[in-house]
Amino acid sequence: MVAGMEFNSNNTLKRDLEKYAAQYAIEQERQGSLGDGRSSIHYPALFLFVGDLVAPAVSAVQEINRLKWDNGDGVVYVQIGTEDEADEHQGSAAEQSANDHGYPNQAYTSTNSRMDRLGGASHGKGSSGDHGQVTRHCLPLSAGQTERPSKTRRKDVHRSFHESDQALFDLNRTLRRVSNRIAEYGRLYSSFDRIYVTVVTRADDPLNVLLPELTKLTEIILSQAFKSVQTDLHVLVSEMEQVDSFGYASAAGLAFLRELDYMQSLDYTFSGNLLVTEDGISIPVTHPASPLFDLVYLLSDKNERGTGVPGGWVENAEIICRICLLKNRKQDVDHSGSVSSTGANTYNNTSFKNNIRTTSDQHGYASAGFAEIRRPNKPIALAVLYHMYRYLLARMRQEPDWSIKDKLAFFGLDAASVERKVEGLLPNEDLVSGMSGIMTHNVSFSDLKTLSLREAERALFGQGAEAYFRDNVVRLVEERVRERSSGGSLRRQAEQSRAEHPEVGYFQWAAWSDSEPGSVREALLGLIRDKSMQLESARALLEQRQQERVEDQSFKRALFRDKQNVRNLIDCMLERVYVPKVELLRLENELHLLRIYDTEMEELHRFSRHVTAALEALERTLRETATQSIAAADEYIGQNVMEYYGKVTEELITDLEAKRGRDVWFEDRYMGDMNQLATEGDDRLLKRLMEVCHSLLLTAEPLQLPFEEELLQRANVTIAYGDKDVLTRDDLFRRLYHTLEDQAVVRVRVFDYTQEHRYEEKYFFGDHHSAFMDYAAHAEETSRIYKLGVVYEERSSGVEKLNLMGGFHLEDLMVYRNGKVYYDSYTENGYELHPTGLVEKLSPIR
């Protein structure tokens, strides 16, 4: 195995793939590669999050606005939380809240770690920390979630705030700093006359008992920089059963809703010394008789049908952002400088407010539902990556049209190469003449002729001939064999051959070095068997020769010349015995070399199979990740992604190779030598793979179809030509229209689905030139009883729908009705759920 070669775990690779897919999806939103242009808001916007329980929503809202608003980097976010007596209480409460409602832990963690970096806060004095656009302010109040809530928690929070001059002063300072920061973003907005404030809180968060104070102080400070401050409230409620905290949370939630009804009454007034100067001088702030908030939206983790919302209440961040955009969208200006229409039946805030007000002039509340259908960018990125890699892997697996002789030659194991390796092993000098000079014993020919050649050799030379052969031939050959069989010689030969034949890589190495029929190793084993048989034959021949009798040998005999006859016998003996011994030695060492190569081939197989197994595992990981991403998407929107983009990828590859050549993938600026890359670790390979896929495929025109055209083609990709089940454009539009309506169901449970004062407005967000948007604008034109608006944006990757519903009262909500029993029980058990003196001002529970 190559030194340092490592392969990442499956989980690490999947995380890298998810980042890659997410980055591609972000690019489609931000870089306009699909013709998408982000919306802009007209006036500055401030999001004020009240309470510790809404901490997870801060990053969610910020991320949505950052992606979808062109000037989203100028939006300011403030979260006002509390200091708990023990920091872990606050952390566990917010984290548990995030977990209970399906929000990913990292959202909570980022908020908490931000506080850690800021150094936290000390008791008795409020603290705040800035992190880019987000400001976190901690009030010196103990309002975190504890195991047994205090019977006067909400009352205590209210009292502690008003008793702490330092808390009020620190809050003033934080909000003024925020106001200055908004001014720094002035260049991002068309107008600085007005600011939109969006207040977000959880109904069961104890800090919302300070909502009037926090809202009015924010408004009065902002009004010093803006001519108009418009404030909406979004109340997040949880209707999903909570195992550990359902009782008190329900009671506290209803207490807040009662107070909210009071804040939204027409005769609601407020006054308090909230403004504090640097010299400690308090200045009164008043609110004249009118509702505290312009509009109040209630959003739940259940929808109107009673079905839980995937992602819990934090999923409502999308609704909050879209409502803000609807009210504060920048108007397009044409070349003449006049404001052009941004869509049919644009949103009118005054009209909506008037329509949800009841006949008794009682303030009506609103809710909303949201749905989006868009090109599934993450699954697409992963599917294209998988199909591209699958193709490259097929190319790497492709066998060249080689004979077994060619394959043997690749490893240097063909007959000619092996012969060259064996050449020079044996001494070049004449062995017979060299051994002729060996000292002999004085033995007469007559004594020798009845002996065998083996016996005659010993009689003449003793051990001398064998020692001479061993010292001058065998040891020399063994030394040369050792030199020529240094470790890894077969691998080096294969690497040299691969430089000449780059089409032969580790898949071929693995296949050819296996012992399957037709492989190089099978041929090598065949050579070893043949050479072993030759060796056995040579040994048998030598044994036979050594047993022959001297008198049977056909060498020239001289009469009466005994010494000459002995000399002639020695020459015959060397020719008949030691020449076969040399051949035997050659065969033994050739066989030894072949066995060394076989051992090296086993090692080569283990190495190449390890690399190819990792390459195949990466293919499985790519497929699994793409499949999981598709499964996570909407079943209808994610249909046929693998099938369709398999064909798209194939067509792109064919077109690219026709223009640049079949080996374009393996140019150094793209994938390069994938075999070498594979040995450097699958993280390196995956990184290069993602870069090449992005540059060569994901930016291609076939991946930039308008979303409805893409969806239509994808829906029909598995249907044969002429099939009666083919989906037409009208069929697709009908399905999209009804899918959006079905998924945009209002996210709050109202006791009476058709309540008396129900009023609805529905808005599509989509491309100017979209055929579907034109269809949606006129669908059910004669039968609908709600206002339909169309907001045109430069987007081709999807369409969104926002349903607004209002006109209900708080007592119409299921969460209100279900909370009464807990509210009454806690009150009867001595719990004080309201600030001092407020209960008398509240309307009775209905």
Image (cartoon, rainbow, N blue to C red):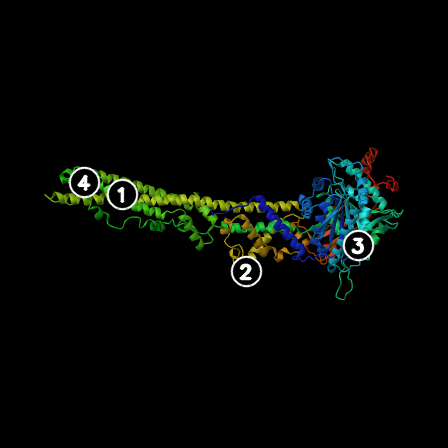
Mark 1 / mark 2, whichever is N-terminal = 1
- Helix or strand or loop: what does disc 3 sit on? helix
Distance of label 4 from label 2 (alpha carbons)? 82 Å
- Where is residue 196 shown, x and y percent of the image? 78, 54
Distance of label 2 from label 3 (alpha carbons)? 61 Å
Mark 2 / mark 3, whichever is N-terminal = 3
Label 4: how many Cα within 10 Å (few below 14, some 14–19, many 20+): many
In this view of the protein, which residue sits in the foreground, 661 or 624?
Answer: 624
Quadrant location of the C terminus in the rendered image: top right
Instruction: Kindly identify the residue that appears in the image at 66 percent across and 53 percent down.
Output: 26
Label 3: how many Cα within 10 Å (few below 14, some 14–19, many 20+): many
Question: In this figure, which residue is indicated by the disc labeled 2?
Answer: 659
Question: In this figure, which residue is indicated by the disc labeled 4?
Answer: 460
Mark 1 / mark 3, whichever is N-terminal = 3
Instruction: Tell whether label 1 touches label 4 (CB within 8 Å).
Output: no
- Where is residue 596 shown, x and y percent of the image? 38, 44
Q: Is residue 738 visible?
A: no
In the rendered image, the residue lying farthest to the left is 560
In the rendered image, the residue lying farthest to the top is 829
Instruction: Tell whether label 3 touches label 1 (CB within 8 Å).
Output: no
Mark 4 / mark 1, whichever is N-terminal = 4
What kind of residue is marked 1? Answer: Arg
Question: In this figure, which residue is indicated by the disc labeled 1?
Answer: 470
Distance of label 1 from label 3 (alpha carbons)? 105 Å
- Helix or strand or loop: what does disc 4 sit on? helix
- Helix or strand or loop: what does disc 1 sit on? helix
Mark 4 / mark 3, whichever is N-terminal = 3
Q: Quadrant of residue 86?
A: top right
Q: Quadrant of residue 125?
A: top right
Question: In this figure, which residue is indicated by the disc labeled 3?
Answer: 222
Q: Quadrant of residue 180?
A: bottom right
Q: Nearer the viewer, mark 4 or mark 2?
A: 4
